[in-house]
Amino acid sequence: MTIAQDLAGKVVVVTGAGRGIGRQIAIGAGSRGAKVALVELIAENLDATVKEISAMGITAKGYKTDVSSESEIIKNFALIEKDFGQIDCLVNNAMIHDPEDLLATSLEVWNRTLAVTLTGSFLTIKATLPGMIKRKAGCIVNIGTVNAKAMIGSDSYSVAKAGIHALTRTVAVRYGPDGIRCTTVVPGTIATDAWQERVDRNPQIFEKLKPWYPLGRVGTPADVTEAVLFLLTDKAAWISGSEFVVDGGLLAGYAPMFKMVEGSD
């Protein structure tokens, strides 16, 4: 099997698939032979991405879903299994990002962030696991963040994503004997639409972030996608419970600091 078709025959579900990282993962999985179910709340983003992917000759179908709603998850994931026969792989990418600090975060925003980012992943996993357990095979990839590993702001988002990291470990250990693999991909700064409001306020934000990244740039959705696609394939058959950091070297050490400590800056 060539790398171009190393997901052939698999059904891959991607949440938050209407734009950014989720869209790129859906395209990438389909390009490697998978049938793709796109789960997304914003109808226009969902319709546009499904149309784009289908035009590439990929089997794809969209499901408008609020991932924080248990009833919608139960209904739509049952529909995905009916439409595609089964779910082989699940990628939990849907999230809400709020940049405020704790004191500026309302309880409403806090609860909504956790509901979508963390509880949504719990609900999709809960809906997907029975079929995977029955077949004794399945792969779940959760999209985490470097914010879960170090304090980099965006407090409610960071807390919700830290829960995602713990959820991965829970699923990997508890359901590993049932043939289920679960991993976390941990991106650094990725230039997506989610940053648009901050870019509008500060058009130089990505340039200003570059010095913190040893590889000299912020990431792209394609950088994250390649890691996710590898973990979905059978090449990663003995990888579970792990955190795959895709951050341009950010967490290895805070690049501007060592020069100051050494007196070289």
Image: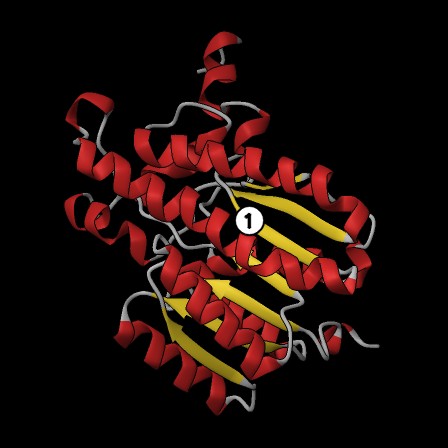
Colour setting: secondary structure
Q: Position of residue 48 (x, y in %)?
A: 34, 80
Q: Position of residue 106 (x, y in %)?
A: 16, 31
User: Quadrant of residue 28 in the image?
Assistant: bottom right
Q: Position of residue 98 (x, y in %)?
A: 26, 40
Q: From what the image shows, is residue 77 above or below residue 182?
A: below
Residue at 53% x, 9% y is 262
Where, quadrant-wise, is the N terminus in this rendering?
A: bottom right
As drawn, is 185 to the left or to the right of 4? Answer: left
Residue at 49% x, 14% y is 264
Q: Position of residue 44 (x, y in %)?
A: 26, 76
The answer, for residue 146, to whether it is visible in the render is: no
- Foreground: 244 or 215? 244
As drawn, is 241 to the left or to the right of 189? Answer: right
- Tell me the amino acid under the disc marked 1: Asn
| Residue bearing the label numbered 1 | 142
User: Quadrant of residue 108 in the image?
Assistant: top left
Residue at 38% x, 27% y is 152
Residue at 54% x, 58% y is 127
- Foreground: 183 or 261? 183
Local crowd size for mark 1, using a 10 Å CA cut-off: few (<14), some (14–19), many (≥20): many
Where, quadrant-wise, is the C terminus in this rendering?
A: top left
- What SS does tag 1 mark? strand
The answer, for residue 195, to whether it is visible in the render is: yes
- Foreground: 144 or 227? 144
Q: How many marks?
A: 1
